[in-house]
Image: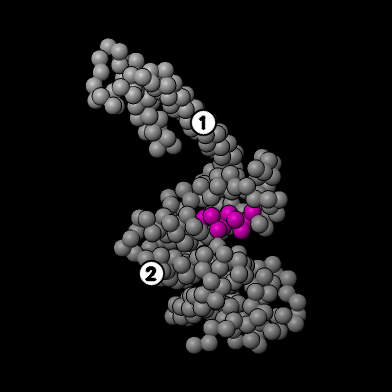
């Protein structure tokens, strides 16, 4: 188990990116907060051999993704993890950036949680296909196809909303 | 539908994320249709406002992990203790059977024996059954 000082630094580096990810994928703040806390506790309890920061971060996002997917499958059986348009994405930044929220977050809301997860891990966190495949427990080839579809879908929605490159 | 990504897509995403563009990669991202789309999507997603208020401090999570770890250790200790109690009860029961073997043998072969002389055996059997009932339930809970 890592020492407290290292955990403090790790938390400072990863907490905001993780919470951003969870809020976009979960669609509910309460669930995102629960999964957020549980993910860190599990990282602290893990027995990773000589973990680097990158390995710990990957483990953190993998754990969070598994928890949120399990929660989704347990509580929302009528709506699939792969289904689209399954809920609002909460934001506390409405007053700060209304246009971004209405364009990008509004577009994300129309995607399935799985597509949101893929897009966020690939294009915000910068994980490659192999890492995402491990995180989502799918084949690397499947990640390529799913990510392509998710990207095309988001592009279509963004284009329909009139968002152009750089916005 | 061609889903084959550009082999440089990941480099483009990382450059976009860090802001460190090699000029050649930047030119590529503008000329490659696949990477152009990636830049549009990644830019849009990376501009979504980040979170500023965290639900909990690191210290709370640290203490919670410590508590959970200690609780798990105690649970393990409980399990070991219960297994120990059960083993002692079982050995005791076997001891009584061995000690009263002529009675046990007679009881099984004749189908009956005097109630008073069988009393220790019944008590031992009752104790063993009780211990089993208690430990089995707690073990299942753990």
| Res. B48 image quadrant | bottom right
Query: As drawn, is A145 to the left or to the right of B125?
Result: right
Secondary structure of residue under mark 2:
loop
Label 2 environment density (alpha carbons within 10 Å; few <14, some 14–19, many ≥20): some
Magenta stretch: helix, strand or loop mostly: helix
Q: What's the residue at 73%, 74% (across, down)? A: B21
Q: Where is residue A151 shown, x and y percent of the image?
A: 51, 77
Secondary structure of residue under mark 1:
helix
| Res. B116 image quadrant | top left
Q: What's the residue at 51%, 78% (across, down)? A: A145
Does the magenta run of residues contain A59? yes
Query: As drawn, is A44 to the left or to the right of A151?
Result: right
Query: As drawn, is A114 to the left or to the right of A76?
Result: right
Look at the image and tell me in which quarter the C terminus of chain A lies.
bottom right
Give B113 or B52, whichever is nearer the viewer.
Answer: B113
Label 1 environment density (alpha carbons within 10 Å; few <14, some 14–19, many ≥20): few
Q: Are marks 2 and 1 in contact (CB under 8 Å)?
A: no
Look at the image and tell me in which quarter the N terminus of chain A lies.
top right
Foreground disc of the pair 2, 1:
1
Between the residue at mark 2 and the residue at mark 1, the CA separation in whole angstroms equals 46 Å
Q: Is residue A15 above or below residue A101?
A: above
The label shown at residue B80 is 1
Does the magenta run of residues contain A150? no
Point out the stretch of residues depicted in magenta.
A56-64
Q: Where is residue B39 shown, x and y percent of the image?
A: 60, 77
Q: Is residue A107 above or below residue A40?
A: below
Query: As drawn, is A55 to the left or to the right of A145?
Result: right
The label shown at residue A83 is 2
Q: What's the residue at 29%, 27% (across, down)? A: B108
Q: Where is residue A93 shown, x and y percent of the image?
A: 50, 58
Residue A129 in sight: yes
Give B35 or A105, whichever is nearer the viewer.
Answer: B35
């Amino acid at each position: 188990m890592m020492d407290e000082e290292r955990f403090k630094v790790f938390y400072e580096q990863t907490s905001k990116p993780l919470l951003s990810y969870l809020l976009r994928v979960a669609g509910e703040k309460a669930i995102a907060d629960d999964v957020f806390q549980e993910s860190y506790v599990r990282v602290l309890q893990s027995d990773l051999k000589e973990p680097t920061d990158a390995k710990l971060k990957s483990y953190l996002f993998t754990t969070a993704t598994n928890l949120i997917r399990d929660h989704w499958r347990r509580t929302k059986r009528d709506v699939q993890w792969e289904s689209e348009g399954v809920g609002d994405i909460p934001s506390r930044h409405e007053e700060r950036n209304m246009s971004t929220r209405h364009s990008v977050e509004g577009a994300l809301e129309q995607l399935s949680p799985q597509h949101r997860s893929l897009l966020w891990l690939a294009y915000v966190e910068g994980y490659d296909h192999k890492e995402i495949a491990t995180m989502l427990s799918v084949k690397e080839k499947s990640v390529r196809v799913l990510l392509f579809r998710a990207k095309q879908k988001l592009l279509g929605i963004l284009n329909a909303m009139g968002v152009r490159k750089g916005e | 539908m061609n889903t084959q990504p550009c082999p440089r897509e990941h480099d483009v995403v990382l450059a976009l994320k860090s802001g460190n563009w090699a000029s050649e990669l930047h030119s590529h991202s503008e000329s490659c249709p696949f990477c152009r789309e990636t830049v549009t999507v990644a830019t849009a997603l990376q501009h979504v406002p980040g979170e500023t208020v965290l639900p909990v401090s690191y210290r709370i999570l640290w203490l919670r992990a410590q508590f959970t770890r200690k609780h798990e250790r105690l649970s393990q200790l409980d399990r070991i203790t219960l297994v120990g109690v059960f083993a002692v009860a079982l050995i005791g029961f076997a001891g009584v059977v061995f000690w009263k073997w002529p009675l046990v043998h007679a009881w099984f072969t004749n189908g009956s024996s005097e109630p008073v002389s069988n009393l220790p055996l019944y008590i031992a059997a009752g104790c063993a059954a009780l211990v089993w009932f208690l430990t089995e339930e707690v073990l299942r809970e753990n």
